[in-house]
Amino acid sequence: MNDLKQRIEGHIEALSQFTATPGQGTTRLTYSKEDLQAREYLKEKMKEYGLQVSEDGLGNIFGKLEGTLKDAPSVLIGSHFDSVPNGGSYDGPAGVVAGLEVAALFAKNKIKPKYPLEVIALIEEEGSRFGGGLMGSRGIVGSLGEEEFINLTDKGGITTVEAMAEIGLDPSLPKKRDPKTMKAYLELHIEQGPILEEKGIPIGMVEAIVGLAQLEITVEGKAGHAGTTPMDRRSDALVVAAKMIAQLPEIALSEGEGSVITTGRLHVFPNGANVIPNKVVFTVDLRSGREEHILNMIGQVQQLVESFHAFGIKNSVQQQLYMPPKAMNQEIIALLSEKCSELNIPFCSINSGAGHDAMVFSDVTDVGMLFVPSKDGLSHCPEEWSDSQDLANAVQILYEAAKKLTEAE
């Protein structure tokens, strides 16, 4: 177990070096130089562990251990390797590392599966560069179509295809994957909240993942000189946007049952200190465990935005992402729970307030997800940290479950 812990720590430490913001957390945007560095590291480790490495037309990475059954569906295990700006070292990479170490245990113990085992490292789960999020998994299952993918741009106007070419990836490779090639998907993730740490329990058995929607709202007014335009003659896009944003929390509070709403990104144009803003673009992230609450909140946000159509102001709402709440597969939950008990590792049921690639895969295959505690419940910040002993426990559980799912002897 000590060797396993050290290898996990080594992987996490190595991947954390691939950041655009050294000393200020992990900033690894999709198709960036740092993405390429992490990609090369992961592919090298996959090969070292005896896996056949490939990439798809989205840039997702696969490391495959062939099974003895011909053309059999794979048991996928992994997570994402992109980050939010100035994030932590564990959100995403911990799950990819867990997949690598499960494969390493298969190799070490000379285990030959019937069904293939595939370690998967997914791109753009966070949506930090191209918006929306869950891009790698959505492309695999086909809910992100080819045309939509090639039309996506970052805030600098660079398209996905251009960004892929920049680091030598091939966007013409297949993207969507036949669901018949996937037997199951397993994902380990840090909790990103305080529950497991407060309970002193090392493993969270995820029962369900909240639904979420992401909207982009554009408010257009009229630019003008900050000193010479009278107050009653202004169409100030930022003032209107601020009034909208100030009313958003009340929408979530009135919906209740843990519903949340967040404005996380805001761009002001032309962004001059002495110019009245003529355009503001901001995001609205809505989440709830019940789909009716998400739909209600989307409707209320749209009504709110429409109520400001006046005084030279023009508004629009674009829905960038919609995912209903997703339950994990009960048979896989039972299998993971059984393995926890056999290994004498305490666990408890937990729901995820964050979105994950697991929720996308749950539409096409059987999915199971484990959480490990997050120190002080922190995530999406440089202080994010999880204990390598908890990660090693999770690897052991996933290894035993993967043996069963691949029906390895």
Image (tube, rainbow, N blue to C red):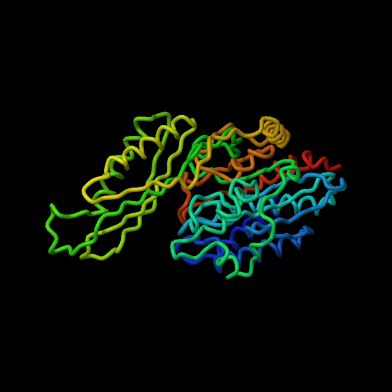
Locate residue 100, reporting x and y percent.
70, 54
Q: Nearer the viewer, residue 143 or 370?
A: 143
Horizontal relation, residue 206 to residue 353: left or right: right
Horizontal relation, residue 313 to residue 79: left or right: left
Locate residue 231, reporting x and y percent.
13, 54
Locate residue 367, reporting x and y percent.
66, 38
Give the residue at x 79% y 50%: 106
Quarter of the image that includes the C terminus: top right
Where is 121 relative to 254, above or below? Answer: below
Locate residue 405, reporting x and y percent.
77, 39
Q: Nearer the viewer, residue 254 or 44?
A: 254
Give the residue at x 80% y 54%: 107
Q: Quadrant of residue 40?
A: bottom right
Give the residue at x 63% y 70%: 168
Q: Quadrant of residue 253?
A: top left
Q: How many marks?
A: 0
Where is 312 relative to 333, above or below? Answer: below
Give the residue at x 59% y 36%: 206
